[in-house]
Amino acid sequence: MRIIDAHVHFYPPEVGRDPAAWATARGEARWAALCTRRRRDGRPVQTYPDLDRLLRDMDAAGVEKAVLLGWYWEQPATCAWQNRVYAQCVQAHPDRLAAFATIHPAAGEAAVRAEILRAQQEGLLGLGELSPHSQGYALDDPVLTGALALAGELSLPVNLHAADPNAGRYPGRVETPLEDFVRLAKAHRRVTFILAHWGGGLPAWEANPTVRHDLANVVYDTAASPLTYDDRIWRTTLDLVPREKVLFGSDYPLILYPKIEVEPGWTRLLGEVDHTGLTPEEKELVLAGNAARVLGL
């Protein structure tokens, strides 16, 4: 069965050598709080595999293609830097990798527009992972509004970070009120929004017919699922929303099972999917078909 991971992160060796120092030099304190922290037993929450290791891990798990998502950086310069890194990755491995571009409205309207157009020309196929709540700009920021309008014109899907309001607290966590995503979906009908991390629980709102209509242009990815939900989330969500609205995502290289794993990977997560009661047709759509359609793969 085909597997397309719609939510993967990648950092080049200059980050992995000393992530905390790199973040300090770049002015990326929020990323450092989230990604360089350690668990109570001293182990890191994630590692920093190089590109060869990423591809080997994909091979080992049978992942056909990984979609590299940008981070919700605090500095526009870091956004542009990561976009260039991702363009190089996609150009080197077009059969295995795709990527999204990331932006920050603080760069200004002209610069953000130019960055989106450049990223598209370089082969990037969406925007995200963005987080207005984390990056410090309003949902109605005029630069964001222009960027989303351009994304709609160019048929670029937009991935947004969503956190379940009922999930546990951790360093760097930022609240992402679910009603904000409904507002964005209604305001930008031409944009396909991908809400990360099961949409922070938003699929439950789709039991309401009015909200279901409002979220017609919204789909959800499953990134970091085991860190927030037990395996019932798969069947429960597919009973709430059309099966075409869920995209498989891992959040690699985040360590998804910290009590029993010390390295990132897909094998255990894919094993979880096998025991969730999804039909073969649902698994085919969730693991690859929906991403292929939404992302134009």
Image (tube, grey):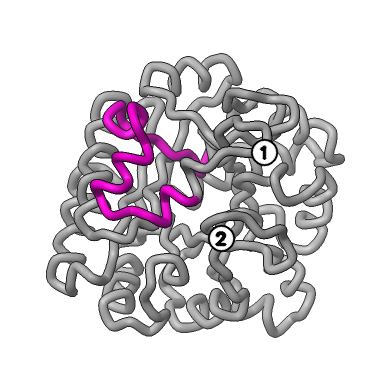
Say how many tags the image has: 2
Q: Does the magenta stretch include residue 32?
A: yes
SS class of the residue under badge 1? loop
Q: In which quarter of the image is residue 279?
A: top right
Is disc 1 surrounded by few (<14), some (14 to 19) or many (20+) residues within 10 Å? few
Q: Where is residue 230 in the image (x, y as percent from the top left)?
A: 81, 46
- Identity of the residue drawn at 77% across and 80% down: 208
Question: What is the number of the mark on residue 40?
Answer: 1
Q: Where is residue 288 in the image (x, y as percent from the top left)?
A: 58, 38
Question: What is the number of the mark on residue 173?
Answer: 2
- Identity of the residue drawn at 83% across and 39% down: 276
**Distance from label 1 to label 2 (Cα)?**
17 Å
- Identity of the residue drawn at 65% across and 43% down: 285
Looking at the rendered structure, the kind of residue marked 2 is Arg
Q: Quadrant of residue 127?
A: bottom left
Q: Does the magenta stretch include residue 75?
A: no
Residue 186 sits above or below residue 29 on the image: below
The residue segment tinted magenta is 4-33
Q: Where is residue 125 in the image (x, y as percent from the top left)?
A: 34, 49
SS class of the residue under badge 2? loop
Residue 284 sits above or below residue 215 on the image: above
Residue 281 sits above or below residue 79 on the image: above
Is disc 2 surrounded by few (<14), some (14 to 19) or many (20+) residues within 10 Å? few
Q: Quadrant of the C terminus?
A: top left
